[in-house]
Image: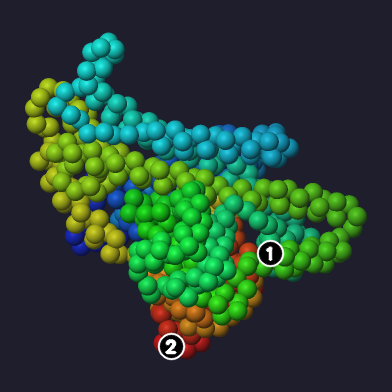
Amino acid sequence: MTHEQTRFPFFAEVPAPEGAEGWESMYPYYLVPSAETAEVEDSRFWFADTMHWSRGAHPFDSIGAEAVYLGAGQNSTRIFVLPAALGLDVRIKNGYVYICPIAVTDPEEIGRRAALFQERAGHYYANWDELYGRWKEKMTGAVESMRTISFPPLGELDPIEVVTEARGKSTSWNVIENYHRLIDEFFLVWQYHFEFLNLGYGGYIVFFQFCKQAFPQISEQDIARMVAGVDVLAFRPDDELRKLAQLANDLGLAERLTADRDLQEIIREFGDLENGKTWLKALDNAKDPWFNYFAEYGFTHDQDTWLSNPAIPFQGIARYAAKIQAGEDISRPVERLRQERDDIVAEYRALLTEQEAQQFDELLGLARKVFPYIEEHNIYVEHWTHSVFWQKAWELGDFLVSAGFTVERDDVFYLNRFELDEVLADVVQSWAIGVRARGIDRSREKITARRRIVAALQAQPAPPAYGVPPAEVTDPFAVMNYGVTTERVQDWLGAASGAAEQLSGIPGGPGVIEGPARVLRTEKDLALLQPGEILVAPITAPSWAAAFSVATGVVTDIGGMMSHAAIVCREYGIPAVVGTGFATAKLRSGQRVRVDGNTGVVTVLADA
């Protein structure tokens, strides 16, 4: 039996892509596999976090890999003390982020941790609404604080107020101070992020396990649908697009709103019409905060928000407007989902004894209570916070250009956060002394070389995994969010070579649909999606919701039962299979496929 069938490659067995040699020097040493840590790394199982980093990470963008898994680890391992799972270890290989769930396997240790978890998590479950309200205040405060950070260019002299107010320190020090604040607040927000998330997954998993035990034949889909059909904040941006499409129709403007027209031309035209002005005012009202929304997941500096690229939300509005004109109902089928949800609950509850039914009610109540957070946190953290964070990082890029240190705005992203700290110290100290910054030539040479390296890394897709699969995947984060289950890993091992006739994944949204596939690598390809096609992507972001009004089915490489793709598909009633591992590599646009969202199987019916 070859190692491909029993394990995935080890890190050292996969060379750098041509032109990307030396990529390791771009990242902090502890994020990169090394000879001194190889024995431990080779014994573990690492899977690609292409959900958050769908392409090779720029040096500065690797900050997310640190902050995310620091926050996850602190809350799982040290704060709430998950019984069977510690944190997720992280490495970058050939530019892509890989994570490894660290399991607790000793039954005695699991028991000790379970008692601690019960006390600590129990406090949150008992006071969920109050603590969640406080969480929202903390997050809003963190975003507003980050907004106050600035990096104004250094003038010839400090302002006279430094003298007249006897401040005793140069304004140039604010650059260093604000940079440290920016980094610190990013890390802080990611600690807040996980304050509730694993508890949310935990509440759902306990209910999930109860159902599996009580109803051995129940599908994962039915369990998920028992908590579906709820209105959460994450659907609000898409709801705003629907409202704007409806308003355009009500004002007699829908025919002018078509996806093939230039957006600026339409805005100018609407500005000359009374009804058009009314619509533009509604558009402005919707923008803050709902357009602070990434078209993808917000983990890299080069992603558009709806504000930075209005063509993205406009395309969604135009699609909805066309549907309204065709006489279609564009509202989300919330009531139907609620009714189906209640019917499923009643059907299964009737099979239980009175005592079991009481436990079922308690666990279902908890799962429904925690569910909104699983989806809503994404708005506060990945969208609202990240949009401000990347805006400030771009301003930092402008600062370095104004200081004559770099040439292009985006040069800043080819330095990691520690290198950038050194560069800012160089700029401020050299300015203070009155000399040319000492590292200009060295940094420009490094940035030029790294542009080539990053391009070479991003030209290669990420293998789904490295290392030795565990006997069982127990980490709630890996299972619920990424869809990395014991069965899925075995499927990946079996599907690593050859063309696909069938792919297995996790049932994401109920129903069965057949149609032509449309393989999309990034959000920039969304315009290619045609009505009736099945959307195939590495992962779908919540902001792709308007595309779901066009697609008849969804298939993703990564994602679990509680991934955003699965939640959105269930709420929109779209058949979906998530976490297939290889869909974008194995399927081609134009192939006719069947998506079975009940069983989690994708079948190729005919070639393109």
Residue drawn at the location 18% of the way across and 29% of the way down: 155
Residue drawn at the location 63% of the way across and 44% of the way down: 199
Residue drawn at the location 65% of the way across and 51% of the way down: 371
Residue 19's place in the image compared with 189, above or below, is: below
Q: Which mark is residue 607?
A: 2
User: Is 47 in front, or is 196?
Assistant: 196
Q: Quadrant of the C terminus?
A: bottom left
Q: Give x and y (percent) for residue 339.
A: 76, 66
Q: Residues within 10 Å of mark 1 (few under 14, many from 20)?
A: some
Q: Give x and y (percent) for residue 192.
A: 53, 38
Residue drawn at the location 60% of the way across and 70% of the way down: 330
Residue 223 in view? no
Q: Type of residue at label 1?
A: Val
Residue 596, by quadrant, is bottom right
Q: Check disc 1 and report its element: helix, strand or loop.
A: helix
Q: Give x and y (percent) for residue 215.
A: 78, 64
Q: Is residue 204 left or right of residue 516?
A: right
Where is mark 1, residue-wise? 334
